[in-house]
Image (tube, rainbow, N blue to C red):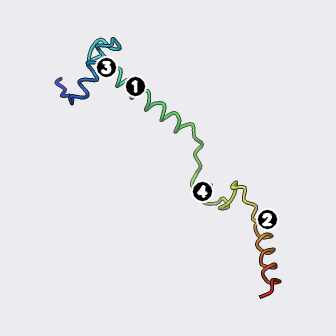
Amino acid sequence: MTVELKPETERLVQEEIRLGRFHSVDEIIVQGIYALREKSNAEQDIARSRPRKKLYELLTRPAFAGSELNLERQKEIFDSNNRRQAQAPV
């Protein structure tokens, strides 16, 4: 198989071989493929480990469930502000 590399890529490959990190272009390609597969597998593992919710559960839950919003407290503040505005001189 013939592969054409951009000059910058070829320079990087030659540098890796010169520094002794790899012994051949083939070794660099093989290690790159293994690294990509490992990364892909890790990403898939992370995606699988996330809890998935069923559409039914998402659609039937209250909109603010678990958001720690205290809507009763918000209503009290709103009512209090309205009373103060109503009592304020115009």
- What type is the residue that disc 1 sits on? Ala
Q: Nearer the viewer, mark 2 or mark 4?
A: 2
Return the mark for residue 84: none
Q: Earlier in the sequence, mark 1 or mark 2?
A: 1
- What type is the residue that disc 3 sits on? Ile
Residue 76 place in picture, x, y as percent: 80, 70
Q: Nearer the viewer, mark 1 or mark 2?
A: 2
Q: Earlier in the sequence, mark 3 or mark 4?
A: 3
Query: Seen from this angle, which residue lies furthest bottom?
Result: 90
Marks 1,3: beta carbons within 8 A: no
Answer left or right for 59 relative to 30: right
Q: Is residue 51 above or below residue 69?
A: above
For label 1, the residue is: 35
Rounded to the nearest whole Å, what is the CA distance between mark 1 and mark 2? 53 Å
Q: Earlier in the sequence, mark 4 or mark 1?
A: 1
Query: Which residue is drawn at the image coordinates 27% and 21% (left, top)?
Result: 13
Return the mark for residue 28: 3
Answer left or right for 11 relative to 50: left
Label 3 crowd (10 A; few <14 / some 14-19 / many >=20): some
Return the mark for residue 73: 2
Marks 4,1: beta carbons within 8 A: no
Q: Which is more toward the observer, 80 or 70?
A: 80
- What type is the residue that disc 2 sits on? Arg
Query: Which residue is drawn at the image coordinates 80% and 86% (left, top)?
Result: 89
Label 1 crowd (10 A; few <14 / some 14-19 / many >=20): few
Rounded to the nearest whole Å, what is the CA distance between mark 1 and mark 3? 10 Å
Return the mark for residue 56: 4
Say what secondary structure mark 4 lies in: helix
